[in-house]
Amino acid sequence: MGEELSLNHNKMIYADNAATTKMSAKAIQAMLPYMETIWGNPSSLYAVGQRAAEALQSARERMAACLGATAAEIYFTSGGSEADNQAIISAAKNGERKGKKHIISTAFEHHAVLHTLKKLEKEGFETELLDVHENGVLLPSQVADAIREDTCLVTIMYANNEIGSVQPIAEIGEICRAKGVPFHTDAVQAAGHLPIDVAAQNIDMLSLSAHKFHGPKGIGMLYARKGIPLTNVIEGGAQERGKRGGTENVPAIMGMATALEDACSHLKENTEKVTRLRNRLIEGLSKIPHSILNGDPENRLPGNVNFCFEGIEGESLLLLLDDKGICASSGSACTSGSLDPSHVLLAIGRPHEIAHGSLRLSLCEENTEEEVEYILQSVPEVVEYLRSISPLWKDKVIGKREFLLPE
Amino acid sequence: MALYSEKVMDHFRNPRNVGSIEDADGIGEVGNAKCGDIMKIYLKIDDDTVTDAKFETFGCGSAIASSSMATELIKGKPISEVMQLTNKAVTEALDGLPAYKLHCSVLAEEAIQAALKDYEERKKKSKS
């Protein structure tokens, strides 16, 4: 089975759904009418424009319904990064007006959040990054303890993009609401994969991105609770109630709304299926000696698997898996084009050396048991080969260097 | 465009001269685990000529390919010539490397220099 697959180069096993997902046929179908017939500008008065405007409104309502929000609280953006930028900058500006310049976040946020916070630091804001522990899960009490009189924002991701750990969002929301501090969550990895109810979870702002749940790229959404003033990141026309200039990408928005609805209506069965595949992968990869699972074993995204393998480097691992038809990702420095390995793996306390040997496999409901078995056959082969040519591994085996991960 | 040239991928997938030399005359190891790459080169030297070269590498695709190519370039060459080997020569032989991967070829050059230095030191010791 495995051999057949590895020889068949047309067969690709896609296990990088946290990077992006394949668009669903439903989402593609939902977009086509808005390129072929209803291609008008929603701001135009004539029929083809107004029909586009109606579609936009319906998409807004459908998105809102998936999240427990109202249509007036949904703002379309170019993606998750823009939504994160706008949410954080808005809360910072609102806080600044009241003399509040303290922001609470975590060290393992996405760079769309961390780099925005860095920018605000240069403008005199103070950011406090909470420890996420070895399992990658924050304690709600850490947030409660960190909130000060001058805290203007708590921004904590719903689920981590690399190690998949899910944060106690409802508990954090409750604490923030009780203390009157705006709470934003980057839900790019969670939307369509975990249940979200912004009202019940006391979420004030939430970012999501369509291409993480089988929608198109280049489109996302910011939810901002009624009463939260937004600061423009993109200036322009009166689109999105004046809060985001630029003609709306109607086809992409229609694709996103359909994809989110589809994901949310199949959430239960998809979660069950993907979780089963994920657990099988974790169980199998755990057998590789001197390896370690990153992120909480239970409290993690249904499709996320992330391991470190001692003595090897992630990029060469990915290239050899690619040769076997497996698409995956790594937090090694070499895959990021920088000198440091993943900030997420460093945040959970993995030493540099170990973080370089990481592998992330992210599954979706389209993956099969056969694919998982093939991955379980391929990864140990590649790890073993790379270890066999690694002087670092050899030194550990002969006792010249210490093993950092248990056998 | 792919990240790596065909040549790099060939040397990465089918590395030449992988392994160690038990009775090596010079061994050079450079890089460190923290940075994610370690290269170790073993040389067999006879009559001032590199008669055999092997390598072990912990690192990315271009680090493995650079080690493989570097050992190919020096095998059978007189020491005087091997000493002149530059990272540029390794990179060119690989049909180029992405800019942020050039340090891999530098490591290969340094590993060979370190192995030659080790050889010279051993020679001095055996004479004294």
Image (tube, coloured by chain):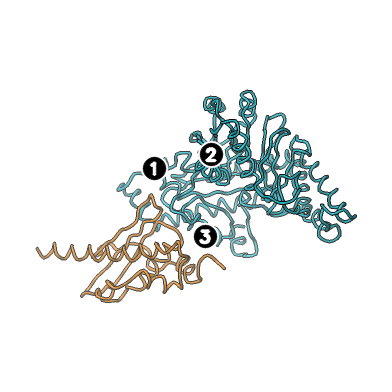
Q: Amino acid at mark 1?
A: Leu
Q: Residue at x 43, y 46 (%)?
A: A354
Q: State if disc 3 and disc 2 touch (CB < 8 Å).
A: no
Q: Which residue is label 2 attached to?
A: A295
Q: CA distance from mark 1 to mark 2?
A: 18 Å
Q: Which residue is label 3 attached to?
A: A319
**Image spot of residue A183 (x, y percent):** 63, 33
Q: CA distance from mark 2 to mark 3?
A: 24 Å
Disc on the earlier residue, 1 or 3: 3
**Relative height, residue A275 to residue A218 (above, below):** above
Q: Secondary structure at mark 2?
A: loop
How many C-alpha atoms fall within 10 Å of the one at disc 3: few (<14), some, or many (≥20)? many
In the image, are marks 2 and 3 on the same chain?
Answer: yes
Disc on the earlier residue, 1 or 2: 2
Q: Chain of mark 2?
A: A
The answer to whether A352 appears left or right of A364 in the picture is left
Q: Is residue A283 visible?
A: no
In the rendered structure, the colour chosen for chain B is orange
In the rendered structure, the colour chosen for chain A is cyan
In the image, are marks 1 and 2 on the same chain?
Answer: yes
Q: Secondary structure at mark 1?
A: loop
Q: Amino acid at mark 3?
A: Leu
How many C-alpha atoms fall within 10 Å of the one at disc 2: few (<14), some, or many (≥20)? many
Q: What mark, if any, has residue A404 been given in the picture?
A: 1
**Image spot of residue A165 (x, y percent):** 57, 38
**Relative height, residue A47 to residue B84 (above, below):** above
Instruction: State the image quarter where residue A60 is shown.
Output: top right
Q: Secondary structure at mark 3?
A: helix
